[in-house]
Amino acid sequence: MPNSADLGLKNTKVELDEKGFVKVNAQQQTSDPAIYAIGDIAGGILLAHKAHREARVAVEVITGESSSFDSVIPAVVFTDPEIAWCGLTEAEAKEKGVKYEVAKFPWTASGRALTFDRTDGVTKMLVDPETERVLGAGITGAGAGELIAEAVLAMEMGATVEDIALTIHAHPTLSETLMECADAYYGHATHVISKKRPAA
């Protein structure tokens, strides 16, 4: 819950939402043009790395630069195995009515996962069937929190599944599971049998 009740905001033009979070625009500016808000008080995903990016945006705007917050935010659950995701999940895509296709690569087929007996993982991508852009990614497995950065970068750059499939990954590595997942989308992954995608 936001701790916004005792900040003296009633003496400003700052507006709160129904849950008590400070309302901000894409530049982190509140409804009081002299006040900016970042991090948990601004609501949304309550993660430190999101707050860090919001702080950069706010400082850039305050110093006269053109900046806005529209970033892909990774989330990680530091369990064993780790769980990490970015972009849309299947549940969110269904709720929003977004068309998507799924590509998966099980770590039982990963040479690197086999070498340290951690085949309890999977790499998954949600793909726009028309543009083949990556809409979201999820990774479960040892080090998933490190691996998700590649999917975040792909989404930030507007990469397609083909871009990831054509990117050479060192073998054997866990990062290779992203390339294999992309290959599985097209039905030509080296280490798993997958249904070939029909030609457009």
Image (tube, rainbow, N blue to C red):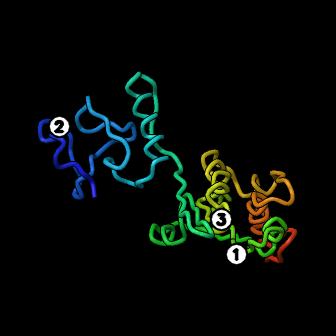
Q: CA distance from mark 3 to mark 1?
A: 17 Å
Question: Does 63 sit left or right of 198 as displayed?
Answer: left
Q: Residue at x 23, y 54 (%)?
A: 20
Residue depicted at x 45% and y 24%: 65
User: What amino acid is at disc 1?
Assistant: Asp
Specify the amino acid type for callout 3.
Met
Check the image and report above or below for 6 versus 132. Answer: above
- The quadrant in which the N terminus is found is bottom left
Q: Which residue is mark 2?
A: 13
Provide the residue designation for mark 1: 120
**Contact flag, marks 2 and 1 (Cβ < 8 Å):** no
Q: Position of residue 130 (x, y in %)?
A: 65, 61
Residue nearest the observer in this picture, 181 or 111: 111
Nearest-to-viewer mark from 3 and 1? 1
**Residue 42 coordinates in the image, percent (x, y):** 33, 47
Residue 125 is labelled as 3
Query: In the rendered image, which quarter is residue 12 located in?
Result: top left
Q: Earlier in the sequence, mark 2 or mark 1?
A: 2
Left or right relative to 143: residue 13: left
Kindly state the secondary structure of the residue where label 1 is placed.
loop
Q: Is residue 162 left or right of residue 94?
A: right
Please rate how many residues cluster around mark 2, counting C-alpha atoms within 10 Å: few if below 14, some from 14 to 19, many from 20: few
Task: Identify the residue shown where x is 17% and y is 49%.
Answer: 5
- In space, the residues marked 2 and 1 are separated at their CA atoms by 51 Å
Q: Position of residue 132 (x, y in %)?
A: 68, 59
Q: Tag 2's secondary structure?
A: loop
Mark 3 is surrounded, within 10 Å at the Cα level, by few (under 14), some (14 to 19) or many (20 or more) other residues, namely: many
Tell me the amino acid under the disc marked 2: Lys
